[in-house]
Amino acid sequence: MSPRHDGLPEATAATLGADFAPAALLSFLDATLGRADGFDLVRIAGGQSNPTYFVTHGRARMVLRKQPQGPILRGAHAIDREFRILSALHPAGLPVPRPILFHADAGLLGTPFYLMERVEGRVFADAALPGLPREERRAIWMGLADAMAALHGARPEAVGLADLGRPGTYFARQIARWTGQWRQSAQGPIPELDRLADWLPANLPPDDGVTRLAHGDFRIGNMIFHPTEPRVAAILDWELATLGHPLADLGFCCIAFHSAPEEYGGLLGLDLAALGLPDEAAFVARYRAGRPDSAPLLPFHRVFALYRFAVIFVGIADRAREGSAAGADAAALAPLARRFAIRAGEIIDGGHPEGR
């Protein structure tokens, strides 16, 4: 552990990759948690939304999440919601990090931020799990399905989140939201995305009234797995969470089965059986085993997930042009908006299996 950095100069911020003065954070931690020997701050690579840092203050090992600097869309980068959700789910026994504190005053670090406990474990950026032995890969994906089923088994009213969003008509409202964001973007024309904006409202399934906490970005890269066991120790990145339909999360997680490795690390085109990975049907079946009352996952849910993800990448490209994207590779990811729209079109046209 490094020694204390009292009186850190402003230049240290650039050295550590921070978008704020580390000395300000150190003074705040000393005043709030008590003075401690040792202070480290490391920005975590990856992620395209909220800047995230590992923070060590004495024996406390924490993670700091904050809004990005610069203008943001209304309702975006809602770290206050993230903190509220962690504060509700952690006492309920769901696998999320323990929240520590939320600081709303932007005067300290330039934006609001919160601190949570750092959970030790394994993070897998690649859905194909190349760093694991073949015989362990299927179990990791099944653990992912189990964690999602457990999350969706929690009723919002039972964990104090009944007012997190509006119940019912989730997909209709989401389609309107993401289409509005797409229409407001300065991106050039993407006909494939326009097609989805028209197809989704015309193929909306009847609303079954099911409302759960929808994570909004439920994928293998947003999980910390137990150091040695194939189970999720912590679900991360709750910025997009709201009351919604559980099949939105399931469809989103299944994007990996409908996108190629070069398309944000998908599995399409790989020999899943040879790699020891489940196919989409097996993954969905495992989820439904944990939630036997779940409705079937339809092509609509997959198309919606890909459309939404495509518009998210439109937003990443917009922020890259404005200079406010959190990820250093944001500009390079811009073409993925069209790629995911094309993949959704393939599902509409019956281009690859639906995995029922």
Image (tube, rainbow, N blue to C red):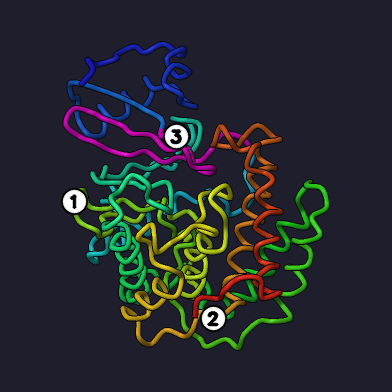
Mark 3: amino acid: Ala
Q: Crowding at label 3, few (<14), some or many (≥20) Cα neighbours within 10 Å?
A: few
Q: Which residues are magenta?
A: 44-70
Residue identifier under label 3: 45
Q: Callout 1: helix, strand or loop?
A: loop
Q: Crowding at label 2, few (<14), some or many (≥20) Cα neighbours within 10 Å?
A: some
Are the residues at dot 3 and dot 2 in contact (C-beta closer than 8 Å)? no
Q: Is residue 229 above or below residue 71?
A: below
Q: Nearer the viewer, mark 3 or mark 2?
A: 3
Residue 168: mark in rendering = 2
- What residue is at 41 percent from the left and 30 percent from the top? 43
Quarter of the image for the N terminus: give it.
Answer: top left
- What residue is at 37 percent from the left and 73 percent from the top? 152
Chain-order first, disc 3 or disc 2: 3
Horizontal relation, residue 308 to residue 14: left or right: right
Q: Callout 3: helix, strand or loop?
A: loop
Q: Quadrant of residue 57?
A: top left
Q: Is residue 36 above or below residue 304?
A: above
**Residue 221, horizontal then vertical, whole percent:** 41, 51
Mark 1: amino acid: Thr
Q: Crowding at label 1, few (<14), some or many (≥20) Cα neighbours within 10 Å?
A: few
Chain-order first, disc 3 or disc 1: 3
Q: Quadrant of residue 137?
A: bottom left
**Residue 194, horizontal then vertical, whole percent:** 79, 63
Residue identifier under label 1: 228
